[in-house]
Structures are given as C-alpha cells and as structure tokens.
Image (tube, grey):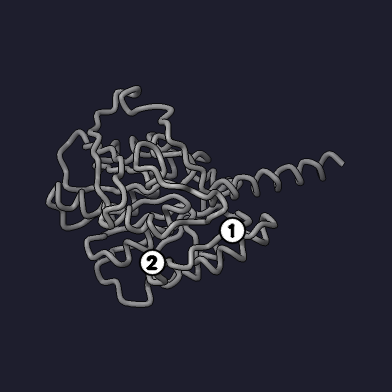
C-alpha cells in the first residue's frame, strides 16, 4: 500500500510541476534584486514595437568583454527575478545577458493577464522589441536566445523568424497551440484559452516550415517522463538539432534544479560548438 501511495504522490507532484511550467502567474513585485547578490547590472526601459507597452529589462555584462549576448525569456510564472541564478550561470560561462519581463509582469507596463489564457500574442512583440533594443544598443549581428516553458516556445518561434538569431536553447518548449490545448486538457482536465490571433509562423511546430539558414542550432531540454511535454513530443518541432533529456528530473519545472552544474555544462557545450 505504501508503494502505491508513494507512486501516486510522485505522479501528482509531476503533474503539479507541469501545470506551473505551462501557466501564467504574473508577479509585479521583485522578491529580490540582482544587487543583493553583488551582481552588477543596468536596468533599462524598452518601448515595445506596437507602442502599447514599456518593458523592464536588466542587462548583465560578463567580466571579460564579449559580443556574445543571450536573451532570456522566462516561463510566465513569477517574473524575471526568479531567474537570477540562470543569469549568473551564463555570465560565469562568459556570456552577456539581457533578461526582461513581459507586459503585465514585474515593473513592465500593466497588462491584464487571464490565468486561464495559455499565452498572449503580445508576448511575441515583447521578445521582438527586446531583440531590436539589444541589437541596436550593442551593435550586434548575432544573438542567442534562451527560454523556459512559455518563453522556450517564444524563443523558438521568434528565433526562427529573426535572421540575427544564432542559437536557441529551449527548456520545455510548447509545441503548437492546438497540441498544447489537447495536452493540457488531458493532463489537467481543464481546457486553457488559446489566442486566435497568434501568427502560425511563430508556433514552434510550424516555425521551420520555411528555411532558417541563419540558425546554427536549436537545443531542446526536457524531462524524461513529463506528462505534458515529453521527449517524443519534441519530434513535432522539425528544427530541433539537439535534445538534452535531464535524467532524474521529475518534471519539466525541475529541469534546471535537478543538476544545475550538469545542466549548464550541456548548455555551454552546445553554444560553444
């Protein structure tokens, strides 16, 4: 009996982890600032290309000068302050980093977020605006994108359509709106609201329907038995060139925390190819 209960509990925790990885839970207040950890940064305000919002972003420059920049798009659960450890890992590996909050999150412009809505098409414009900003500000020709959950799918969709994107690292990317609607309904018993104005070319499953010669590689990170996004599901995204299955990760929300050192060894090795 104990073994059955234990198995059920593990399954429930995995499902709960997956729900958080694919749900919008905006937090406006930063629970911590980079300065608490002696991380030097610059805060900037980025107007969006649709002129409907201003995004809050933090820029971090590596100790040794470099033109290698990574744009981080978070999961939509919390805000960018929750990802400072990942920022530090990229900086320790010699990369500059810009991380930002979508509209409705952190100190970015107010925007009503319905937690039953899976993703907003405005987030595409947010990432596009951040890329335009850092590209112009730092005179860059090539940029790497890194995203988590909702941000992972955005990074693939936008990166496939932006010629300055060199590499994409997508931790637990969503597949397409139609696939995710079905999977979330099966996993949670609830049907999320999907945006009908989302351009299909920015959905990961269809982002590679046209040639993407600008991309050097696309790495996807996934837990071995996540009930929403599994390694087998990633086969629907044709542009993925490498898959890192995180052994021991109970669900996609725990991919980074399962073994942080090995996680970034894999990420840096991919970016260094």
The answer to whether residue 252 is visible is: no
Q: Crowdedness of circle 2 by 10 Å Cα count: few (<14), some, many (20+)?
A: many
Q: Crowdedness of circle 1 by 10 Å Cα count: few (<14), some, many (20+)?
A: some
Q: Nearer the viewer, residue 171 or 47?
A: 47
Residue at figure coordinates x 54%, y 43% from the top left: 254
Residue at figure coordinates x 28%, y 37% from the top left: 58
Measure the alpha-carbon separation of dots 1 and 2. 19 Å
Tell me the quadrant of the picture where the C terminus can be found. Answer: bottom left
Residue beneath disc 2: 202
Q: Nearer the viewer, residue 145 or 122?
A: 122
- The spot of residue 224 in percent (x, y) is 58, 54
Q: Outermost residue, left direction? A: 139
First in sequence: mark 1 vs mark 2: 1
Q: Which quadrant would residue 167 be assigned to in this image? A: bottom left
- Depicted 192 relative to depicted 112: above or below: below
- The spot of residue 256 in percent (x, y) is 47, 42
The answer to whether residue 29 is visible is: yes
Element type at marker 1?
loop
Residue beneath disc 1: 192
Q: Nearer the viewer, residue 89 or 187?
A: 187
- Depicted 21 relative to depicted 89: above or below: below
Q: Outermost residue, right direction? A: 1
Residue at figure coordinates x 51%, y 43% from the top left: 25
Q: Which quadrant would residue 209 be assigned to in this image? A: bottom left
Q: Is residue 19 left or right of residue 214?
A: right
């Amino acid at each position: 009996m104990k073994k059955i209960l234990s198995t059920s509990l593990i399954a429930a925790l995995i499902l709960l982890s997956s729900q958080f990885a694919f749900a919008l839970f905006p937090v406006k207040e930063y629970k911590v600032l980079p300065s608490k950890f002696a991380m030097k940064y610059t805060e900037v305000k980025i107007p969006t290309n649709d002129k409907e919002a201003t995004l809050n972003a933090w820029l971090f420059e590596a100790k040794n000068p470099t033109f290698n920049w990574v744009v981080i798009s978070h999961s939509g659960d919390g805000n960018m302050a929750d990802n400072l450890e990942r920022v530090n890992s990229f900086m320790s590996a010699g990369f500059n980093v810009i991380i930002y909050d979508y509209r409705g999150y952190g100190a970015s412009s107010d925007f009503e977020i319905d937690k039953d809505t899976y993703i907003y098409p405005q987030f595409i414009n947010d990432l596009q605006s951040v890329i335009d900003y850092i590209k112009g500000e730092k005179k860059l020709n090539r940029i790497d994108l890194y995203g988590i959950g909702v941000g992972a799918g955005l990074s693939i969709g936008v990166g496939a359509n932006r010629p300055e994107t060199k590499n994409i690292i997508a931790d637990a990317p969503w597949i397409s709106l139609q696939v995710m609607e079905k999977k979330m309904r099966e996993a949670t018993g609830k049907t999320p609201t999907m945006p009908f104005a989302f351009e299909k070319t920015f959905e990961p499953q269809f982002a590679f329907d046209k040639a993407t010669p600008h991309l050097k590689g696309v790495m996807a990170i996934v837990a071995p038995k996540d009930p929403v996004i599994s390694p087998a599901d990633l086969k629907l995204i044709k542009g993925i060139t490498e898959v890192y299955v995180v052994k021991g990760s109970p669900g996609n929300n725990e991919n980074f925390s399962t073994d942080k050192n090995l996680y970034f060894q894999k990420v840096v090795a991919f970016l260094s190819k």
